[in-house]
Amino acid sequence: MPEMNLFTELRALVIDSLTQMVAEGVLPEGLDFKNVAVEPPRDAAHGDMATNAAMVLAKPAKMKPRDIADALAAKLAADDRIALAEVAGPGFLNLRLAPALWQGLVKAVLEQGASFGRSDMGQGDKVNVEYVSANPTGPLHVGHTRGAVFGDALCSLLDYAGFDVTREYYINDGGAQVDVLARSVYLRYLEAHGEKVEFPDGTYPGDYLVAVGEDLKAKVGDAYVGKGEDIWLDEVREFSTEAMMDLIRADLAALGVEMDVFYSEKSLYGTGKIESALESLENKGLIYEGVLEPPKGKMPEDWEPREQTLFKSTEHGDDVDRPVKKSDGAWTYFAPDIAYHYDKVSRGYDQLIDVFGADHGGYVKRMKAAVSALSDGKVPLDIKLTQLVRLFKNGEPFKMSKRAGNFVTLRDVVDQVGAGVTRFVMLTRKNDAPLDFDFDKVLEQSKDNPVFYVQYAHARVCSVLRKATEGGVAVDDPTLAGADLSKLDHEAELAVAKKLAEWPRIVEIAARTHEPHRVAFYLYELASDLHSLWNRGNDLPELRFLQEGDAATSQAKIALARSVAVVISAGLGILGVTPLEEMR
RNA sequence: GCACCCAUAGCUCAGCUGGAUAGAGCGCUGCCCUCCGAAGGCAGAGGUCAAAGGUUCGAAUCCUUUUGGGUGCGCCA
């Protein structure tokens, strides 16, 4: 496959050179090169890339770092890709690369287009990412929105990095909350029949159920009026959860999120799935009857010791063992969760990822313990927690009472600022850090608004392409890729190429750490570099992308600009944001 | 009480497998532009990376303890 990751390419060169040095007797046999890194130095004055090889190997080779570095530098300098190799500091080897390498990189971007930066690190491994999984009791709110955006971007990122990804939603349709939903809908149904109803505590008073009550009336007429729960509960529950899932699917669609699998919790009951999952644990000797100690320091008021069926999760890293059956013999919520993850493991995934809200942090250990036990430690489960979203409007906290049922919904946000802006902003913070979302600021057209700044860079490039075309200069990608890129020799231009070179590396780091926000930050930096070059064109006309009357030079410079747009477009694609071609 | 997450510039936050003089935006200070390649540009000041120990050639990053904040803690999902 076509790869243009200069960092891995250069690392391979360094390793080759070290291997040669071993063969020549300069270095002793049996060295481990695993920790040898080739990275961009923090300070550009230190060159284009730096390697720590000499320092890492000094101890095992029983040599001075300086001596290793000198020998390695001499070897590397012989390669025509290396313009300069010099030893610095405690033993760093700083490399300056030949301009042709950077020019070749621009060409590679244009040739590979959207797949420049794709990685095969995933090796086609099957990954299941469960996200959103909101209770089917109402529309999605802002908290869900962050989880949805994060999970979806993570999936795209993993796909881009060569994993085989399944996007999955777990429908909590098996617990008491769907009974509450059913009763709430029933009240709306009575209301649709002209009855005056009140919503007691413990029901959902939200307006969004009015239409569901009316739909129910349209379907069954007055068949349930004046009847007891035993008559209507099952039917109404099913009718209502389906209605809610339709609502949720539509919410997700508005955000541009499409799931591959919706997995029903209810389907685990009465089908033997929970039983067989627990049997699997039982066979490993991890199920027993016992009494838990009360939590210290926070004694529940109605605590009394009870014997329960427990999962020995402490054997797999949990703090205490967890009950899987209530004292009345019914399953706890944890039991279907175990069965669900057992099912995921059984479906042959190499890796599982769960995206939860931060308020579920307490379940991380027990879920990991369960998956570890169920898969005999073979399937890793990573759980990503998304922190709160704090809403603002014009710098003022934007509060709504959830109790009243008028919480801020995903729709509220998307309708006001658009799906693209919503998605990008939700990814401008690490998943485990709280996020401030200001309805006004995210639409601001200025440098401190990353969404705008990145889109603006893309739009600017498109504008140049349009102008060039108007001026009769061919700017299709094949033509640009074939341009004389040796004309790109200005330090300011090479700086942009160097930033482009980081893209494949960013993809791999972000994919490995499961942190899509790194893509958003990188795009901001790339956009910033483009704007910086653009601005320098104000003072130095020779840095302008369009060179009047010189098609060849224009094409070389536009090739660089176009490369930036290609990478921005690819990056935004991962984030699920559509790049803009103009912003007037 | 216990567990998990967090603590980086005045503010909001990045910071890769541990790597060199810790970065960005805002704000502040100074200079420049009034162009239409636009929704400003350039430069500067600003840091005990919460504290203390430890590991290491090297720590914001890993380990331990402490302080301060958030979340959660048997029959709610």
Image (cartoon, helix red, strand yellow):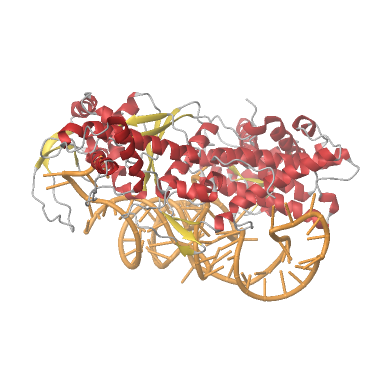
Q: Total of numbered circles in the picture?
A: 0
Q: Is residue A494 left or right of residue A133?
A: right
Q: Nearer the viewer, residue A458 or A431?
A: A458
Q: Residue A88 at what x, y percent from top left?
A: 65, 52
- Viewer-proximal residue, A423 or A285? A423
Task: Say if residue A505 shows up in the picture.
Answer: no
| Residue at the limit of the structure toward the right, as seen here | A549
Q: Quadrant of residue A45?
A: bottom right
Name the one closer to the observer, B74 or A209.
Answer: A209
Report if residue A213 is visible in the image: yes
Residue at the spot 43% in from the left edge and 30% down from the top edge: A127
**Left or right: A505 as drawn, with respect to B63:** right
Q: Residue drawn at (24%, 31%), measured in percent from left and top?
A: A235
**Quarter holding residue B51:** bottom left
Instruction: Give the left or right position of residue B8, taking residue B26 as reference.
Output: left
Q: Position of residue A8 (x, y in %)?
A: 61, 36
The structure residue drawn at horizontal position 17% and vertical position 55%, both measured from the top left corner, is A296
The residue closer to the viewer here, A168 or A20, is: A168
Most distant residue in the front direction: A194
- Residue A111 on image: x %, y %: 71, 30
Residue A335: percent from left, percent from top: 22, 34
- Name the quadrant of the N terminus of chain A: top right
